[in-house]
């Protein structure tokens, strides 16, 4: 009874105490369900980097970080519930890792004044900060990805794709259909034939699509997949003996688990990546100060893999914006509004990346009020049968193709939602 | 021979093989429905659970390691050994039998005599519970299924058809293996139900529960037997689909492909599940081949249901289902 009384009193005291200041970065993660294999390493990388900042630097600007996780199972309704249940914690920024959840959160976060960062996914035209005041998709978006792939193929074909056929194998969803307009424009511009092959969710059955690929023998197959669709597509490509080096995925179709089951047979398969891989000093620090100390979010096995590195990169960009917000506002315990302003003034240089122990992890870029999308650059990597190998430096997209599409789509969104120019006063 | 006709023949053959893969899932539904009248919503998750258990045992992983580590602060993930495929399959069969015992003991024993809709709801609960248990037990990572099944293009068919039609057909060795295994499975199940005492008891229960009880057949025992068989069928389906796509959570969604097969083939016929699967497989493949490109493709999921509904209009009990006649 005495113990119980002490426990109750302690709880009452704790509840009454003012909470210590924390910088809250909610993680709308998915560690369960059909897409968990992609969600787990990303969430691990995100949390582990924030944990490293706490252990190594005492947080950001002297304020500890906190990463409350909420399980969405990649389900849009649950994602919105997670947002509603965590925004009251003083959330500074959301990164839901889901295009479906992003579409639901764009209007909500705008009303609530909380920034939304959707790097390489979500609504592509959110790159137009003049319309989407609280949504950011730097360093790159889907349309950049489509343009980068075509640019790389042009480079490999002496600047001409005339008469060639490029097939797009895509997840039959808003996400999968995103690059179609860009590729149609590029096909017209460079005189290649564009073949569209839709794959129904979740992508376990692709037999008919690969029979068509075998019959029509497109010169290149570009994949816009996620989850099980990627592994099945890679296996089907192997089965029909499609030349793997001519099969190219976007950055959501190039994770370790996508190719590991096929192993050496998948050698040659290429994909984009918005973050460079390799042995970076930050990994040794995470291993020593976070994983070995038992402060890691997962089991530590994902350290350094593609999606772990991307999650860590996302956390790094959030942490840099938070530090900038502290500097701009002169306040250590910043709020979401200050965070938004800092994200709009964010500049990532090689010096900053090197200082964080991740030299060259991403391209250098600067965000402005009008441009929330960054430079849109990405590297191309190749599976050598055992590991991903970086093939190229950061490749730039063709802005003359992507920018008019962004302007057109965002103008339509602005008209539908009665949004006036956000940047006219700046 | 016209090129399009040759292509259509290749599509048809592949559709037949895909249909057999659907049938493997549908068989589990049929077994349970036939013996107990329960539409087992959890059949797809059972395939997932069986496949995850098989791979977990093969890789020597510690079940519930995440839970154990969270409670005791340990970092134990595997035993450090690998189990041969055949032994792992046998151990998984034992796990599925234990699962059947538990389901009967803790769920359906208490629901005897309830309305079919109550039993169906119970299987929905079971599906979500089992999915959670699978996650806790083996984790959510994608695992590679390797039980020695062949995979990739069959060179003999490729070369032979090239000589005959001037175009080599693609047939996946895994699909051929699935067809062979399905044929053995169906023959085994039919032989078991025709020529063994337990099989006859199963058929008696399927025909009339009351009559079977009156001659001393234990309903409880037969239902455990049926759930065990459905568990083994789920394991076979899990192995075949897991070999195709890796063992991961979307494996449970294969149950959605079994529904049109059941609607078409009937809920109570084992041959119906096979023939239904083949009709669905060929139908959706030919539709995707002929019409798909004109309407944006990705027609397989919905067209399977359209095809099943068309059959239902003319034969509500399915092709091989028993006609229900209720006298007032």
Image (tube, coloured by chain):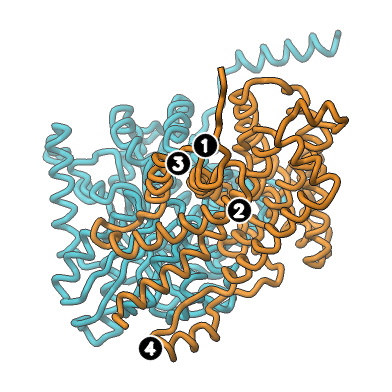
Residue denoted by label 1:
A63
SS label for mark 1: loop
Sequence-wise, the earlier of marks 4 and 2 is 4
Residue at 59% across, 59% down: B241
User: Which badge, 3 or 4, comes first in the chain's sequence?
Assistant: 4
- SS type, badge 4: loop
Residue underneath mark 4 = B166
Is B27 placed above or below A66 here? below
Q: Residues within 10 Å of mark 4 (few under 14, many from 20)?
A: few
Subunit under mark 4:
B
Q: Which residue is mark 3?
A: B315
Residue under pointer 2: B271
- Chain letter of disc 1? A
Residue found at x 70% / y 72%: B148
The reply to whether residue A50 is in sight is: no
* Crowding near the residue tagged with mark 1, few <14, some 14–19, many ≥20 C-alpha atoms within 10 Å: some
For the residues tagged 4 and 1, is the chain the same? no
Do callouts 4 and 2 mark residues in contact (Cβ within 8 Å)?
no
Q: Chain of mark 2?
A: B
């Amino acid at each position: 009874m005495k113990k119980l009384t002490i426990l109750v009193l302690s709880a009452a005291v704790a509840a009454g105490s003012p909470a210590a200041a924390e910088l809250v970065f909610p993680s709308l993660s998915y560690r369960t369900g059909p897409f968990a294999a992609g969600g787990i390493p990303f969430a691990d990388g995100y949390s582990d980097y924030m944990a490293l900042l706490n252990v190594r630097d005492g947080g950001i600007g002297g304020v500890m970080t906190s990463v409350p996780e909420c399980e969405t199972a990649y389900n849009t309704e649950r994602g919105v519930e997670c947002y509603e249940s965590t925004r009251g914690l003083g959330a500074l920024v959301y990164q839901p890792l889901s295009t479906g959840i992003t579409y639901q959160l764009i209007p909500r976060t705008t009303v609530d004044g909380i920034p939304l960062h959707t790097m390489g996914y979500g609504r592509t035209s959110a790159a137009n900060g003049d319309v989407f005041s609280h949504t950011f998709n730097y360093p790159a978006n889907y349309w950049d990805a489509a343009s980068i792939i075509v640019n790389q193929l042009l480079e490999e074909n002496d600047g001409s794709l005339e008469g060639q056929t490029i097939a797009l194998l895509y997840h039959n969803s808003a996400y999968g259909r995103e690059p179609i307009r860009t590729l149609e424009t590029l096909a017209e511009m460079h005189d290649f034939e564009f073949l569209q092959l839709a794959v129904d969710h979740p992508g376990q059955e692709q037999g008919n699509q690969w029979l068509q690929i075998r019959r029509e023998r497109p010169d290149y197959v570009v994949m816009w997949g996620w989850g099980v669709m990627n592994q099945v597509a890679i296996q089907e490509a192997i089965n029909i003996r499609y030349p793997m080096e001519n099969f190219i995925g976007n950055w959501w179709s190039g994770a370790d688990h996508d190719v590991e089951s096929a192993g050496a047979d998948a050698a040659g398969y290429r994909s984009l990546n918005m973050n460079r891989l390799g042995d970076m000093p930050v990994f040794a620090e995470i291993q020593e100060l976070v994983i070995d100390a038992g402060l890691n979010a997962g089991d530590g096995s994902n350290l350094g893999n593609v999606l772990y590195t991307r999650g860590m990169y996302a956390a790094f960009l959030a942490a840099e914006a938070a530090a900038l917000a502290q500097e701009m506002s002169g306040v250590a315990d910043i709020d979401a509004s200050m965070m938004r302003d800092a994200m709009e003034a964010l500049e990532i240089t090689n010096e900053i990346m090197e200082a964080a122990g991740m030299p060259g992890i991403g391209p250098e870029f600067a965000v402005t009020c009008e441009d929330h999308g960054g430079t849109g650059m990405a590297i191309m990597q190749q599976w050598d049968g055992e590991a991903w190998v970086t093939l190229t430096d950061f490749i730039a997209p063709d802005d003359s193709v992507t920018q008019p599409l962004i302007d057109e789509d965002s103008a339509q969104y602005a008209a539908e939602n009665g949004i006036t120019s956000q940047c006219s006063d700046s | 021979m016209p090129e399009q006709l040759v292509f259509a023949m290749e599509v048809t053959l592949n559709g037949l093989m895909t249909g057999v893969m659907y049938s493997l899932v549908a068989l589990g539904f049929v077994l349970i429905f036939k013996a107990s009248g329960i539409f087992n919503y959890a059949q797809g998750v059972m395939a997932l659970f069986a496949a995850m258990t098989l791979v977990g045992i093969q890789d020597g992983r510690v079940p519930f390691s995440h839970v154990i580590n969270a409670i005791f602060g340990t970092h134990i993930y595997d035993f450090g050994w690998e189990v041969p495929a055949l032994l792992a399959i046998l151990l998984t069969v034992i796990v599925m039998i234990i699962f059947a015992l538990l389901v009967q003991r803790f769920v359906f024993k208490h629901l005897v005599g309830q309305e079919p809709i109550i039993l169906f709801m119970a299987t929905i609960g079971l599906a979500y519970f089992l999915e959670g248990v699978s996650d806790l037990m083996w984790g959510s990572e994608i695992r590679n299924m390797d039980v020695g099944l062949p995979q990739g293009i069959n060179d003999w068919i490729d070369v032979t058809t090239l000589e005959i039609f001037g175009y080599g057909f693609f047939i996946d060795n895994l699909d051929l293996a699935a067809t062979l295994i399905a044929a053995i499975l169906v023959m085994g199940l039919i032989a078991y139900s025709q020529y063994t005492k337990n099989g006859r008891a199963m058929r008696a229960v399927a025909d009339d529960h009351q009559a079977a009880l009156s001659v001393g057949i234990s309903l409880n025992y037969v239902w455990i037997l049926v759930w065990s068989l459905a568990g083994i069928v789920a394991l076979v389906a899990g192995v075949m689909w897991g070999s195709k796509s890796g063992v991961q959570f979307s494996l449970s969604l294969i149950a959605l492909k079994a529904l049109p097969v059941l609607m078409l083939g009937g809920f109570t016929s084992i041959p119906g599940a096979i023939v239904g699967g083949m009709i669905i497989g060929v139908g959706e493949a030919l539709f995707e081949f002929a019409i798909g490109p004109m309407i944006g493709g990705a027609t397989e999921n919905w067209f399977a249901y359209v095809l099943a509904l068309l059959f239902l209009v003319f034969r509500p009990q399915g092709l091989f289902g028993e006609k229900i006649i209720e006298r007032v």
